[in-house]
Image (cartoon, helix red, strand yellow):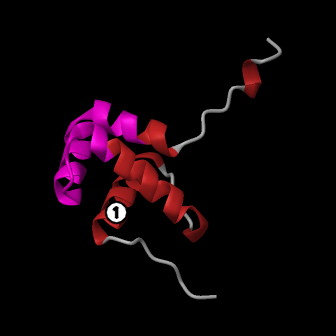
Amino acid sequence: MPELHWSEPGLAAIASVVASRTGLTFGPIRFESAEHGIRRAMTRTGLTDFARYRQLLESDSRVFDDLLAELVIGETYFFRDA
């Protein structure tokens, strides 16, 4: 099986920021969905440059939280029977 890589080096840098702050990592099977999530979150900021977006992630917690919400699945089943 060939090794999969991020389609853009800037995406790997953004994923590294997420991993260092949350411990959340993306295996090759999740690269495509993570890339789409990163791009959707970037679109909301109006940025298209990965390096500038990474800097914004590191300086603005709201932007980071928005990206994190885009990348994780919110589980609510814990509260359904409460």
79 relative to 6, above or below: above
Above or below 59: residue 14: below
Q: Position of residue 10 (x, y in %)?
A: 28, 65
Q: Residue furthest right?
A: 81
For residue 25, say whether it is visible: no
Quarter occupied by the C terminus:
top right
Q: Position of residue 28 (x, y in %)?
A: 56, 70
Residue 26 image point, x, y percent: 52, 61
Q: Nearer the viewer, residue 35 or 17?
A: 35
| Badge 1 amino acid | Leu
Q: Secondary structure at mark 1?
A: helix
Q: Residues within 10 Å of mark 1 (few under 14, many from 20)?
A: many
Tell which residue pokes out farthest to the bottom in this image.
Answer: 1
Q: Quadrant of residue 40?
A: top left
Residue range in magenta is 42-67
Q: Main secondary structure of the magenta part?
A: helix
Look at 44% across and 40% down and name the residue there. Answer: 68
Residue 57 position within the rendered picture, expressed as x and y whole percent measured from the top left: 26, 44
36 magenta-colored: no
Q: Badge 1 is on which residue?
A: 11
Q: Residue at x 60, y 33 (%)?
A: 74
Whether residue 52 appears in this view of the structure is yes
Q: Quadrant of the N terminus?
A: bottom right
Q: Is residue 15 left or right of residue 57?
A: right
Q: Is residue 58 left or right of residue 73?
A: left
